[in-house]
Image: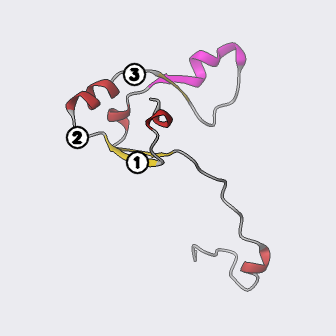
Amino acid sequence: MKCHEVKIDNFLLPLREPLKDITREKLLKEPLERAIGVIYRPETELQSHYFFASLPHQFDEYIWFDETRAVEAITRGTTKDMPDTFPFGL
């Protein structure tokens, strides 16, 4: 998919019940996708790092953000008097 070329900052694309059947049909194709978090082994990269994926079979919706930024950590001063399990309260 070439979502950036749509020139929309962000959008939500329903995949289970799309607005048009042709959208689902085109997205049912199974291109190779690269796995995240795998141990890099160049000698088996294609077999161990890539898999065939079909968005409508994997997800209900596709969310696109054209531009993002990194999360900023909470500084220690902000959590000084909070329990170690903040914000989860476990």
Mark 2 vs mark 3: in front: 2
Mark carried by residue 11: 1
Residue 79's place in the image compared with 6, above or below, is below
Q: Is residue 79 left or right of residue 63?
A: right
Residue depicted at x 44% and y 44%: 8
Decide whether the magenta segment is chiefly helix, strand or loop: helix
Figure quadrant of residue 61: top left
Which element type, helix, strand or loop, lies under badge 2? loop
Span colored in magenta: 42-52
Mark carried by residue 30: 3
User: Closer to the camera, 13 or 73?
Assistant: 13
Q: Is residue 19 left or right of residue 56?
A: left
Do callouts 3 and 1 mark residues in contact (Cβ within 8 Å)?
A: no
In 3D space, how far apart are the residues under numbered discs 3 and 1 (Cα atoms)? 22 Å
Q: Amino acid at mark 2?
A: Leu
Which element type, helix, strand or loop, lies under badge 3? loop
Q: Residue reaching furthest top?
A: 43
Q: Amino acid at mark 3?
A: Glu
Q: Is residue 3 left or right of residue 20?
A: right
Residue depicted at x 69% and y 30%: 39
Image x and y of residue 6, in percent: 43, 36
